[in-house]
Amino acid sequence: MDFKLGDILKGEIMDFTHEGNGVMKKDNFAFFVPGGIIGDKVEIKIRELKKHYGTGSIIKIIEPSSDRANNDIVSFSGEIPLINYNYSKQLEWKRHKVKMDLLKFAALSDIEVKDTLGMDHPYRYRNHMQIPVGNRKGKAVLGFFEKGSHNIVDMDGSILQPEIGDEILDTIRKWVEKYNISPYDRRTNKGILRHIGIRTNKDNQAMVIIVTATDNLPNSKELINVLKSKEGIVSIYHNINNQKSSPTYGRKYIRLYGEDRLVDYLGNFKFSISPNSFFQVNRSQAKILYSTAMDYLEPSMEDIVFDIYCGIGTISLYIAEKAKKVYGIEYIKAATDDALENAKLNKINNAEFITGKAEEVFPDLMSKGIKGNKVVVDPPRKGCEPEVLEAIVKLNPERVVYVSCNSATMARDVKYLLDNGYEAKKVQPVDMFPHTAHVETVVLLTNSGSKAKK
């Protein structure tokens, strides 16, 4: 069957993509459908055609899925694509996704994948929000990017952030309107206000980060005065990001008011959070994630552990309390600086943090005779570099705990370790990001006793 742009098709949503779009197939050709829920029978209009897939927008839901939840929340912006999918079904789908990735990329058909560990109340969990600002029909909009575009969907608040975040967003919106602050235009690279960052801690205190494309923040005194009058706002920063294409935050931070850091907690540990710190955005689930990693690692006071891609040292500190020594490796210097600060804050003196690329630092430590008997890896979405996996095999630790935010690349890396003398023992998905398609996974691999291939 030949398809054309604008064609109207009918079908059933059978699955989700890695981004959370519904998947509908017609004559074995896949269409990705934002807002589609597994089980929905829909009528779609073709918006885009590629060689191997197309995209379509829902014109009508002919028959809603029995698993559709009526949350009455716009979910097409990409922030919360699964918000209208029954939460228990989300957890089942995430377990299935991990299981299928392990089968597809690691040929693991008989490994038990445990039920996904979810939240009792899967809302208001994000402790860090990055909200883009833009212009639509001459009016400033504060919200979230539509999938695959620079268009921003305006919003009053988010069900994913604490209520104080909604109050901050409302306050800034009124300041923008009152003083006619120019929003940044991503097409022309003109304008001032680019993003709003909101970080919150367990004590419901907030750090506000105002990101501009210019060195100047107009009417900043008025903004500071109105924000600091709000209960719980303890820190305000101005961040300058004048790069045309770059991450949300630029390199230059100017503290305008209050504390230079927030202090947050995971279990019994304190963490000092700077404006650009990496910290798990869901603290309650992060505690479960790290506790699972610790259970799988089984550290003892005789153990020397490598924590590769250690970030600000979160897992390292958990391990250090029960191990002889921990070496944390992280590429971003600001993160290792935070890790050292957090070790001092928690009176941990047996954790050493090294700045550099994992694929360079880890083999170098081994060449200097530094050995360890257990390894934790928590890589970015792209997974581990080949050199890191090769170094793990050469080190031949008795246990490897792989913490993953991308089950496909995790499964690929697990396959390498399986081919080089390791056995996969346990797999535990953890729902760190409810109502999105993302799932964290903890995998335990143990040395099978056979000599690892060199």
Image (cartoon, helix red, strand yellow):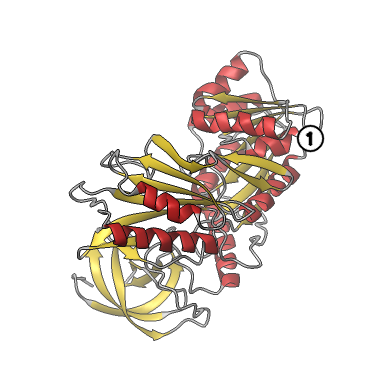
Residue 145 in sight: no
Counting every numbered tag in the picture gives 1
Establish if 266 lies above or below 79: above
Q: What residue is shown at x 68% (from left), y 21% (from top)?
A: 371
Q: Which residue is mark 1?
A: 322
Residue 87, how many percent across, how many down?
57, 71
Looking at the rendered structure, the kind of residue marked 1 is: Lys
Q: Which of the 4 image quarters holds residue 284?
A: bottom right
Q: What residue is shown at x 54% (from left), y 57% (from top)?
A: 126
Q: Residue furthest right?
A: 301
Establish if 420 lies above or below 73: above
Establish if 118 lies above or below 198: below
| Image quadrant in which the N terminus is located | bottom left
Closer to the camera in the image, 203 or 364:
203
Closer to the camera in the image, 184 or 179:
179
Q: Which of the 4 image quarters holds residue 249?
A: top left
Residue 398, how many percent across, how many down?
72, 32
Residue 293 in sight: yes
Say left or right for 204 vs 225: right
Residue 232, how many percent across, how many down?
57, 55
Q: Residue furthest top?
A: 368
Q: What residue is shown at x 67% (from left), y 31% (from top)?
A: 343
Q: What residue is shown at x 48% (from left), y 81% (from top)?
A: 65
Please tell me how crowded label 1 is: few (under 14), some (14-19), or many (20+) other residues with Cα within 10 Å.
some
Disc 1 is placed on an element classified as loop
Residue 148, how many percent across, how many down?
30, 58
Establish if 64 lies above or below 230: below
Say left or right for 347 vs 41: right
